[in-house]
Amino acid sequence: MSAAVETNELAVALDAAVSGTGAKNAGALRVASVNVNGIRAAYKRGMAEWLAGRDVDILCLQEVRAPDAVLRELLGEGWHVLHAEAEAKGRAGVAIASRVEPVATREHIGDDYFTTSGRWVEADFLVDGGSILSVASAYVHSGEVDTPKQVDKYRFLDVVSERLPKLRVEKDHVLVVGDLNVGHTTRDIKNWKGNVKRAGFLPEERAYFDRFFGEEIGFKDVARELAGDVDGPYTWWSWRGQAFDNDAGWRIDYHMATPELARRAGNAVVDRAATYDARFSDHAPIVVDYQF
């Protein structure tokens, strides 16, 4: 059996664990996150068809790489859209689109250096009889060893490390999703031995996630909690070569939740395309249902 088939079967197993069919249960809030690698290109490749079939309540996007008007036109009616564009045209950009209007929104993570970077946006929603769920869509720098790109990545991760505890104190539930561009453990990268000195799997980067998911900050890695101690399920594969067909991927897209919210997560799936040609991005969406 190929690794690709194993990953697809794991996704199906996770999806069926609660509903049996993948359908959304009554009272569930479905949150999807995906790095679209350019929203216009993603829609040309079939993202609209994927979204139409997933009954998503909150959609978090990274690398939108388009003006706000284009994003809204592509998503169509019925969405409340919060979009933090990057000042640099054609770069980054994060968004939260929701079926229900948020009660508050924020685009500033706490460091003016990143104000126009298009890498962080937050929205608060009323859930569970008046509790506040704060959702953040995040896009961490890919980085590059011994360059200013890596310096910026560490600076951003430092700010995230400061923001998470504040959110946990201020809000009833917190969910941070997105392309965080770090594989936390050897289970998160197929060819991890060849990547220990590369950005995305450096010990210094992984140490941040030890803190995120450890006692110090106390968030939960929802997909890992549900999948258990298995390889993947991966969320990113290079467009080049046979990476996708051989399932030589990285798990760098996350749902990070406060413990009470993580306990409400039951139905989770990585929407890995059936074939290379069916992909609308080099990332696959990660979709989780939270029961309220």
Image: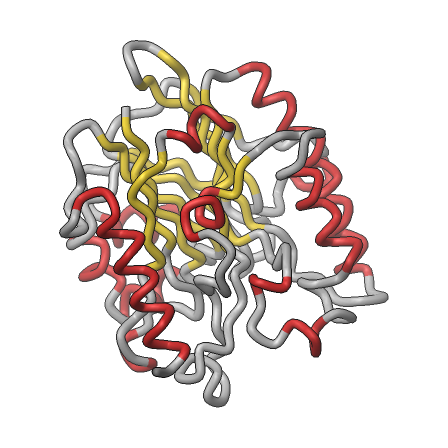
Relative placement, left or right, of 203 versus 225 is right
Q: Residue at x 67, y 63 (%)?
A: 200
Where residue 273 appears, x then y in whole percent? 30, 70
Q: Residue at x 63, y 21 (%)?
A: 166
Is residue 182 in view from this perspective? no
Between residues 191 and 145, which one lies in front from this camera angle?
Answer: 191
Location of residue 231 with respect to 54 vertically, above or below: below
Location of residue 117 with respect to 258 vertically, above or below: below
Callout count: 0
Between residues 48 and 128, which one lies in front from this camera angle?
Answer: 128
Q: In which image quadrant can residue 74 be found?
A: bottom left
Relative placement, left or right, of 122 versus 40 is right
Where residue 128 appears, x then y in whole percent? 30, 16
Where residue 134 appears, x then y in whole percent? 45, 25
Quadrant of the drawing holding the N terminus = bottom left
Q: For the view shown, which residue lies furthest in the top direction? A: 130
| Structure colour scheme | secondary structure
